Image (cartoon, helix red, strand yellow):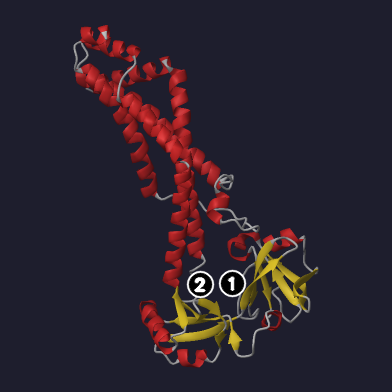
């Protein structure tokens, strides 16, 4: 039995080699389609993995003040009331905002942090700002502004309001996904630049000791201050997950034409064989091959072509995403900001998605090879060869 199967596989390989140019063209087209789908899935999964790692040290709850459904400055006095809730740890105000730089057509995020307390942001060189008039910038800001350490940075907000600070540090490229468009300032500079009233902050961060009580604490904050919006870490994670899945789905939809072409190609193979292929099956039947032997032969032919295409497509997608930074799909999945975060994606392959791609591409192709062969194999050899 083993020798018989070995001979059938050898015959299948020799049959493929006889039609090598036709099969090579099929493999190339098949591989490109699989690589497009796999690239989108690989990039989406890796971006989600990178984004979710940012939430490891993020606050359990962020409390924002709403007015007319829009985010506005929140009273720092809320902190004392929130601290009284059971299970709540440290509550801190945050001072940050967005700034559009007309010189480079870029949006920056301006953030105030305490350099003595916050050590999460790794710097390639230099230091975080320790006094007013200093700043640290992300690699993207440094690139578009052509700035280095000890340079002065001028940020005009209006005719009578501008910020002139000295750069004391530049963030490393390893932290680009978090810091690429970031400018870190002191609390005093942020308050003066955005003209924040005394006793106000951009939002509040709330530490909750027990993760299982985060939702309960958020509800209590909402009842205490109805005009606020407590945002849980789990909600941010779910939002990012939905966002990347939506963008990945949109990218696949853009290539629906390629998928449709493949479906038509598979259907064409399923609806009939060429005269040469029918004649070959008739000859095999005439010299004593059973119907099951013919079907096994066609199975191996279809399997070899599809598995080579599948493996080539997966390898092409891996190289495209993790060695060339997914240059074809990067703008659509990262966003359309001028300051794209340049970072090296960590390889992350979801075996479930690989299996789905395998099932939706290899299985239909093999089936489309076997079905018409079965129709020809069950007929008499003479009738098959005459047709």
Q: Residue at x 48, y 82 (%)?
A: 206
For label 1, the SS is: loop
Instruction: Report x, y in % for residue 355.
Output: 35, 44
Disc 1 packing (10 Å; few <14; some 14–19; many ≥20): few
Viewed as shown, does residue 50 lie left or right of 167?
left
- Left or right placement of residue 119 versus residue 271 in this view: right
Which residue reaches farthest front?
A: 68
- Residue 329 x/y as whole percent: 54, 47
Mark before the other along the chain sequence, 1 or 2: 2
Residue sitting at x 50%, y 41%: 317
Element under label 2? loop
Q: Is residue 139 above or below residue 61?
A: above
Q: Nearer the viewer, residue 169 or 51?
A: 51
Q: Which mark is residue 251?
A: none
Q: Are marks 1 and 2 in contact (CB under 8 Å)?
A: yes
Q: Which residue is mark 1?
A: 120
Farthest residue in the right direction?
A: 151
For the question of whether residue 210 can be seen, the reply is no
| Rendered position, 74 above or below 23 | below
Q: Is residue 117 above or below residue 251?
A: below
Q: Where residue 342 sits in the image (x, y, percent)?
A: 62, 55
Give the class, few, some or many, for how many residues have Cα within 10 Å of label 2's Cα (few <14, many ≥20). few
Pick the residue in front: 113 or 340.
340
Task: State the residue position of label 2.
Answer: 57
Using the image, determine if residue 9 lies above or below residue 113: above
Q: Quadrant of residue 200?
A: bottom right
* Quarter of the C terminus within the rendering: top left
Q: Quadrant of the N terminus?
A: top left
Task: Find the distance from the CA under tag 1 to the CA under tag 2.
Answer: 9 Å
Q: Is 3 on the left-hand or right-hand side of 84? A: left
């Amino acid at each position: 039995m083993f020798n018989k199967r070995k001979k059938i596989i050898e015959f299948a390989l020799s049959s493929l080699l006889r039609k090598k140019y036709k099969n090579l063209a099929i493999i190339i087209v098949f591989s490109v389609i699989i690589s497009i789908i796999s690239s989108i899935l690989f990039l989406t999964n890796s971006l989600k993995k990178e984004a979710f790692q940012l939430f490891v040290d993020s606050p359990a709850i962020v409390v924002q003040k709403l007015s007319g459904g829009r985010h506005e400055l929140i009273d720092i006095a809320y902190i004392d009331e929130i601290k009284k809730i059971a299970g709540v740890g440290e509550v801190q105000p945050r001072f940050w905002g967005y700034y559009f730089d007309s010189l480079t057509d870029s949006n920056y995020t301006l953030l105030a942090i305490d350099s003595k307390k916050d050590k999460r942001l790794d710097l390639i060189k230099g230091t975080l700002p320790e006094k007013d008039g200093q700043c640290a910038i992300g690699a993207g800001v440094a690139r578009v502004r052509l700035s280095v350490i000890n340079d002065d940075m001028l940020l005009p907000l209006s005719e009578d309001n501008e910020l002139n600070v000295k750069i004391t540090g530049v963030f490393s490229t390893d932290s680009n996904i978090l810091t690429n468009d970031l400018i870190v300032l002191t609390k005093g500079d942020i308050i003066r630049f955005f003209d924040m009233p005394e006793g106000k902050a951009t939002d509040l961060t709330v530490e909750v000791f027990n993760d299982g009580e985060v939702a309960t604490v958020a509800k209590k904050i909402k009842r205490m201050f109805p005009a606020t919006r407590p945002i849980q870490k789990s909600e941010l994670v779910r939002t990012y997950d939905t966002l990347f899945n939506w963008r990945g789905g949109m990218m696949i939809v853009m290539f629906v034409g390629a998928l449709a072409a493949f479906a038509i190609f598979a259907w064409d193979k399923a609806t009939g064989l060429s005269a040469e292929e029918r004649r070959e099956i008739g000859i095999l039947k005439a010299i004593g091959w059973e119907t099951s032997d013919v079907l096994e032969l066609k199975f191996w032919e279809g399997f070899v072509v599809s598995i080579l295409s599948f493996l080539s497509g997966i390898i092409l997608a891996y190289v495209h995403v993790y060695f060339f930074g997914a240059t074809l799909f990067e703008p659509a999945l990262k966003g359309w900001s001028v300051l794209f975060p340049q970072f090296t994606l960590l390889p992350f392959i979801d075996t479930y998605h690989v299996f789905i791609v395998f099932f939706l591409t290899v299985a239909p192709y093999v089936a489309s090879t076997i079905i018409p062969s079965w129709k020809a194999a069950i007929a008499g050899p003479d009738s098959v060869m005459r047709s």
